[in-house]
Image: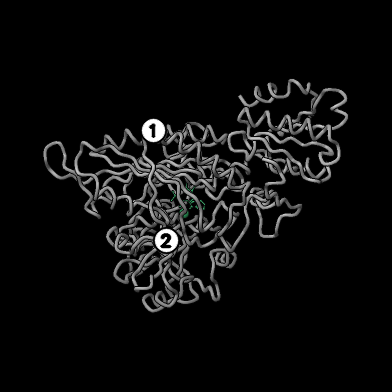
Amino acid sequence: MKSSDLLIPTIKEAPNDAKIISHQLMIRAGLVSKLASGLYSYLPIGLRVIQKIEKIIREEMNKSLAQELLMPVAHPAELWQESGRWEEYGPELLRFKDRHERDFCLGPTHEEVVTNIAKQYLRSYKQLPINFYQIQTKFRDEIRPRFGVMRSREFIMKDAYSFHIDEASLGETYQVMHQTYCNIFDRLGLEYKVVLADSGAIGGDSSHEFHVLADSGEDAICFSDQSDYSANIDRAETLPQGEPEPPKQTITVAETPNVKTIDDVCQLLNIKPKTTIKTLVVDGDNNSLIAIVLRGDHELNTVKAAKIKGVKLPLQMADEEKILQQLGCSIGSIGVVDLSIPIIVDYAAACLSDFVCGANEQGKHLTGVNWGRDVSKFVAADLRNVISGDPSPDGKGKLEIKRGIEVGHIFQLGTKYSDAMNANVIGEDGKAVNMNMGCYGIGVSRIVAASIEQNHDDKGIIFPESIAPFQLVIVPINYNKSSRVRKLADELYERFLSQGVEVLLDNRKERPGIMFADSELLGIPHRLVISDTHADSGNIEYKSRNEIDKIEIEFKAAIDFILAKLA
Ligand code: ATP
Ligand code: MG
């Protein structure tokens, strides 16, 4: 392609809202254009990158014998009501009505639709296993769209869904997808880690995420310093820590007027957060409330909390008003002594003794509180985020925490959807069986951002060859003035094209400095520069985007030289 036929809207300065490097560079290189919060257009160069990623994904998915299909973006509410997710999914699900007042949503994921297809067309175990995939636009009304296409509201996902007669078959396909994902991410040139992920209500080791490690990552990934244990913090378990010490203190009421946070309490009473507990209150089923108790310095793990029996989904902190009404004090004063609602205590809080907590009375706290003696009814559970230095749950070493960008997720769903939607086939014994399901997602648009987070320098993007918008750029100096340069550049361009090389000929009437800067900003892996001086010498200048030095090569040898680089 020639630059004159291509929109290259590069800019020097990134907009203020672009906080991370990939977002800045994607805007500066003219890959995407923002329409509104979390909504982006892929401009021609950005789309080329997306299409290259999609091609690799298609090739590997097809190789795994998955079958491509394409499902609608708009889904009727009935399907989501059948699975129970119309209520459960929360505000990320964008719901709307059509002109006949029928309820619809924009698909954030397609388990319901694909299960509906399976239900219609799969009749016998003989048709299984089967794996359907699509590359399609998803919509999630994210609470905080940010970082450009990294967390947008509309984005492109590859999603696949497999159907099986039993768990063993699901396990086999899961392994195939695991390997397929490794092949895909290897070919995309990403450095990634596979980590244990939360598998929702199903439990077990049936979910893995693929993470690109980068400081800008939104996920915390936990690694053992002595084993290969790695897990998303959502999933990383904490273990029970043994019995608390016997009580030494008696309960005493402390006046804590105007105190709202743990830090306030600690400052006032001159104590450390780890000797206090905080009591959070979440909504339970049937308008009930549930207290969740953590050590003062620990953070709630909302994924773990959502699994507490009787908790209303999606997990939600109870309303101030409701707390005041049912418990008689505001959230900052709630404590565990004589609390009238179920109490679930994190393991670390459950082994404290002589701790401080709210007194269930406005402006008062209790000191010297002890489990057992002062609070008899409670359940201990794993409810907090692990912190750096916690013991690894496999018993080997300590946990370290790094940041990761989730680019893929594979998941054994079991029969969750086929049970809810009655999707069955006739088994070998003639009886109907609900199908086991797996699902497998890749964030296609997020990969562009993740790749840039990993591959850039102060001049711009350094795309891996496999996803670069062009493999090669030819920059002729004075293309529009020197007929010699033009002739040589055109000839080279045509020859590369006939060799199937994705080549860009920069024939713009721009200063060389701008053409060089653009080729570097865009991250095109290979660059050839041709000028009158080169024409005199019979040489041409080559530079790899990855290396600092330029080299001179013989003009005649340029094709073979580049082809060897691309091999
Ligand atoms: P996250 O924890 O980042 O919200 P998720 O668990 O909701 O991700 P999945 O439902 O597993 O994501 O979706 C499959 C893939 O789609 C993810 O691995 C991720 O790469 C991508 N993805 C999810 N949400 C977004 C988004 N808002 N913008 C861009 N890509 C996304
Ligand atoms: Mg999400």
Q: Nearer the viewer, residue 487 or 385?
A: 487
In the rendered view, tell whether residue 80 sits above or below residue 214: below
Q: Which residue shows up at 77% across the image and 43% down it?
A: 517
> In which quarter of the view is residue 395 placed?
top left
Disc 1 residue type? Ser
Residue 343, horizontal then vertical, whole percent: 35, 62
In the rendered image, which residue does mark 2 sit on? 106
Res. 245 in view: no
Residue 139, horizontal then vertical, whole percent: 46, 58
Task: Residue 250: give its label.
Answer: none
Residue 14, horizontal then vertical, whole percent: 71, 55
150 with respect to 18 (left or right): left
> In which quarter of the view is residue 559 placed?
top right
Task: Report how many numbered discs are placed on residues in the image.
Answer: 2
Q: Are marks 2 and 1 in contact (CB under 8 Å)?
A: no
> In which quarter of the view is residue 321 placed?
bottom left
Colouring of the image: one colour
The quarter in which the C terminus is drawn is top right
Residue 1, horizontal then vertical, whole percent: 66, 40
Q: Residues within 10 Å of mark 2 (few under 14, many from 20)?
A: many
Q: Which residue shows up at 48% across the image and 40% down it?
A: 210
44 with respect to 397 (left or right): right
Q: Residues within 10 Å of mark 1 (few under 14, many from 20)?
A: some
Task: Residue 64: give its label.
Answer: 1
Name the element at disc 1.
Answer: loop
Mark pair 2, 1: CA separation: 29 Å
Please report whichever mark, 2 or 1, sits nearer to the chain's N-terminal start.
1
445 with respect to 384 (left or right): right
Name the element at disc 2.
Answer: strand
83 with respect to 393 (left or right): left
In the rendered view, tell whether residue 445 sits above or below residue 554: below
Q: Which residue shows up at 38% across the image and 70% down it?
A: 98
